[in-house]
Image (tube, grey):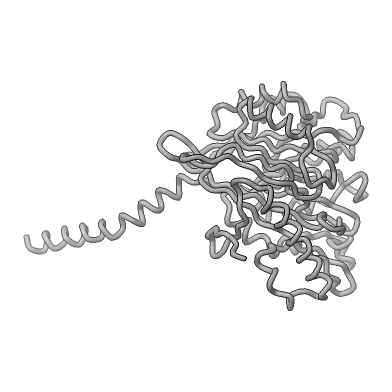
Amino acid sequence: MESLVKSFRIITLLALFLTPFMTLAQDRNHVMTLLFAGDIMGHDAQIEAARDDSTGAYSYDSVFRYISPLVACADIAIGNLEVTLGGAPYKGYPAFSSPDALAEACRNAGFDILVTANNHAADRGSRGIARTIRVLDSLGIKHTGTWTDSLARDTLSPLIIDHDSISIALLSYTYGTNGIVVKPPAIVSYIDTVIAADDIRKAAVADKKIVFIHWGTEYDSLPSRQQKRTAEALLRSGADIIIGSHPHVLQPMIAESDSSGIRYPVIWSMGNFVSNQRTRRRDGGAMIRLDLTMRGDSTVISNAGYVLTWVYTPTEEGKRRFFVLPCAEFENRPEFFQSSSHYDNMKVFIRDARRLLDSLNTGLSEMTCAEGEWIKVTR
């Protein structure tokens, strides 16, 4: 009897000790962390950098070497694939077709979803659209924004993603395809607020409805009047989150907030995630992080922030390389850079970005991920 009592006490003590950790684990199961990245481009210099001259094979894994730990901090990572995977001959601007290895590297870096509705979606015509979809499917990368035919669109859109007890619906649209007419049966999702309203209604099953949209004026740091009108229409139709790309530079980020959490974030433009655009303000961008949390029967946005990123292009073994750097991690490490000009250019990007976002953002602050935990950047 004494041994039985002793065993019961031990079990009780273990239960008391483990309860906080069990509760923490249960709470974590009710949080979905989303991470969004801007334009993933494929200029000629990037294609050349990825090519192994001795074998002719391509690899982009090193591009994401320094940013992949931050991507790993998210449950779901989503980027804008602004190239086709149309096959050889590989080409950059103005009609992009990148090696399949670019998408493979995105997957290896931790990206779960790539949106394909953008102005370069039809650069290799309907065949390029279909081949891009086949490659993404073969790599196990989810995607939305282009489809092989209307049956695929009706079946696969909206893209619904479930994570434990939380679900999101992802929709993707573009303002156009650079004047290229997409021949049936292939489909590119163009911005049409009437169609989008219907798509959003179909997504009502999801806890949060996200619109990833390609819009705005290239190289303009402020949203256009048309962007604002479109955003208003999408929010009226029931969109919960709007994520913007295309201008190739950062634009402000806005969100409402109240006692229940953050509401209706609109990211006008995330800028470039990786590209060969090297002029001021075009050489970097921001990743957007949003936490979705279950509170009772509701899902709220409990936290929101951004991570500044910059594209570092040193020359190694006679070849130009591309690396996406998290700015907060490298802004005080001048010794890392091949030359002072690289470091100075990154500092200019950081200064410009913070000046813009500090003055015009509402509801989103600069963050980084350290040892698996998201923290605010201290300056």
Left or right? Give the position of 46 relative to 78.
right
Location of residue 112 in the rendering, given as x and y in whole percent from the top left corner: 65, 47
Q: Nearer the viewer, residue 311 or 62?
A: 311
Q: Quadrant of the N terminus?
A: bottom left
Residue 19 visible here: yes
Location of residue 144 in the rendering, given as x and y in whole percent from the top left corner: 71, 36
Q: Residue at x 87, y 47 (%)?
A: 97
Q: Residue at x 22, y 60 (%)?
A: 13
In the rendered image, the residue lying farthest to the front is 359
- How many numbered tags mark residues here? 0
In the rendered image, the residue lying farthest to the bottom is 335
In the rendered image, the residue lying farthest to the left is 1
Q: Quadrant of residue 178?
A: top right
Q: Quadrant of residue 190?
A: top right
**Image height check: is 297 above or below 19?**
above
Q: Quadrant of the C terminus?
A: bottom right
**Image height check: is 375 above or below 263?**
below
Location of residue 89 in the rendering, given as x and y in whole percent from the top left corner: 93, 49
Location of residue 35 in the rendering, given as x and y in whole percent from the top left corner: 63, 49
Q: Nearer the viewer, residue 196 or 340?
A: 340
Q: Quadrant of residue 348?
A: bottom right
Left or right? Give the position of 317 relative to 335.
right
Q: Nearer the viewer, residue 190 or 193?
A: 193
Residue 163 visible here: no
**Image height check: is 294 above or below 11?**
above
